[in-house]
Image: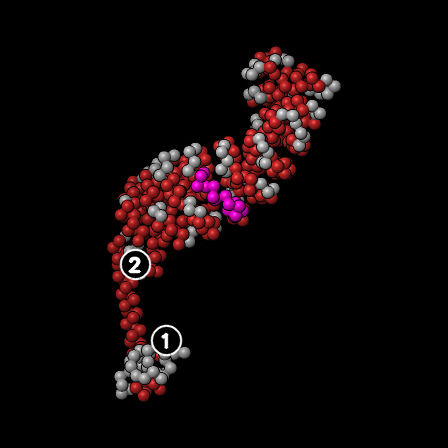
Amino acid sequence: MPSVNETPPIQAVVDSGVVPRLVSLLPRDDWVELQFEAAWAVSNVASGTQQHTHLVIQLEAVPQFVRLLESPSEEVREQATWAIGNIAGDSADCRNYILSLGAMPLLIKAIGIPVSKVTILRNAVWALSNLCRSKPPPPLDAVAPALPVLAGLLNHHDKEVMTDACWAISYISDGPIERIQRVLQSNVIDKVISMLTAPSVAMQTPALRTIGNVVTGNDVQTQVIIDHGALAAFHFLLNHPRRAIKKEACWCLSNITAGSVDQIQSVIGADLYPVVKNLLDAPEYEVKKEAVWCIANTTSGGTKEQLRYLVDIGILDPLCRILTLYDLKIVTVALEAIENFLQLGQDDMKERCLSQNPYSAMLVTNGGYELIEALQEHSSPELYNQSVSVIETYFDFEEQQRGAAQQAAQQQQGAEQQQAQQQQQGGYNFGGQQQQQQQQGGGAWGNGNGNAGGGGYNFAGAFGGN
């Protein structure tokens, strides 16, 4: 029998033709021992291949397993939850079929029944998580009733129970803002955030996934994560020895930096950008890619001061090195971020009367300009056109110098015109005209009240004299 073998010979049992007979024994409430053995055997068949799972469904065993969630025997309930978890985990269609039979409220009720062994609870919570899993996700109304019990299970002493409960929450939160909001309203966020730095990677992973799902929502939902102190855990996560954790943490942070200016400032305040800068040179490509998105999102939505902060911490050097990668998409994103810095430099030239774009000069010094030039040899027409546009717009140094000279000349001409206007309006007091100038509004430096005596510029006359 498959129920007494660690690696049950499922196909041999199926070939024997005994499975229909086993399913027929599941309704035997009058003989619990036999019912248990039959449930054990059929649940093992359901844990086999997809064909084995579908055989169990075709034999209409699933309604019986759902019914057995209310069995007074905890051993029978355990087998029922094991079978339901396996079948639900097969596909979204199987999961939806089980939910349509009303399994969720019965499973929630079964989880609330005290049990003699923690393994029974583990199986039940794992089965519940599989009812929330797979894409497309199940209807929110079908799984949201589980949130209160899941919130309680996050505080259970058993780590496996906590982990599967957190996975279930992550599945529910994966989707549009309505799903995220239901999770936020269940008051689980503080506990989930505390699990980000748990000693077990198995616990950290679903917690990080949940936080990542929430910050894909709107700015208000993202702010909840920030307000509850999640950013403090990201130093640990971004420096994690596991590649998958670092990647997920970077992905999560990139969604936060795609938020509001205040949320970008929170990331600055948490001192996370220097860590992201280091990850631009990470050996793991997946981590490097997410780090680029963190910076690109910041350059798109951040303030000028926030972009200058990134320059000050040295972001341009590693960002330029991204241009040497073979991934067209991420090179394009990096070049767009660099262009945002260059546009900031153009703005600074005008506002601060600089002779050249300071960030163009930086890229010439650090070799970034040559890397952008090299992109003109790229096989992608889009990237070729983008690199040409960047060079023509931000690296025409002769044009920049001409523009700066023209701007200086215009300023000089404006000053001369202003001086001439002041002279025409009596801006200079030549002694013999002192009485006349005083009668017209006075000549002293800037007070324009006609009682400062002779000499000096008459600012009252030049600028309106109020």
Q: In this figure, which residue is indicated by the disc labeled 2?
A: 354
Compared to residue 401, the image places residue 364 above or below, namely above
Residue type, mark 2 in image: Leu
Of all residues, the one furthest to the top in this rendering is 16
Report the colour scheme: secondary structure
Report whether residue 272 is seen.
yes
Label 1, secondary structure: give it: helix
Left or right, 295 with respect to 10, comes to left
Left or right, 80 with respect to 360, comes to right
Could you tell me which residue is drawn at 38 percent across and 39 percent down? 279
Could you tell me which residue is drawn at 26 percent across and 59 percent down? 402
Residue type, mark 1 in image: Phe
Magenta residues?
Answer: 223-237
Left or right, 81 with respect to 404, comes to right
Location of residue 290 by image quarter: top left
Q: In this figure, which residue is indicated by the disc labeled 1?
A: 463
Residue 95 percent location from the top left of the image: 60, 30
Q: For the residue carrying disc 2, how many other residues have a C-alpha within 10 Å: few (<14), some (14-19), or many (20+)? A: some
Location of residue 139 by image quarter: top right
Q: CA distance from mark 2 to mark 1?
A: 28 Å
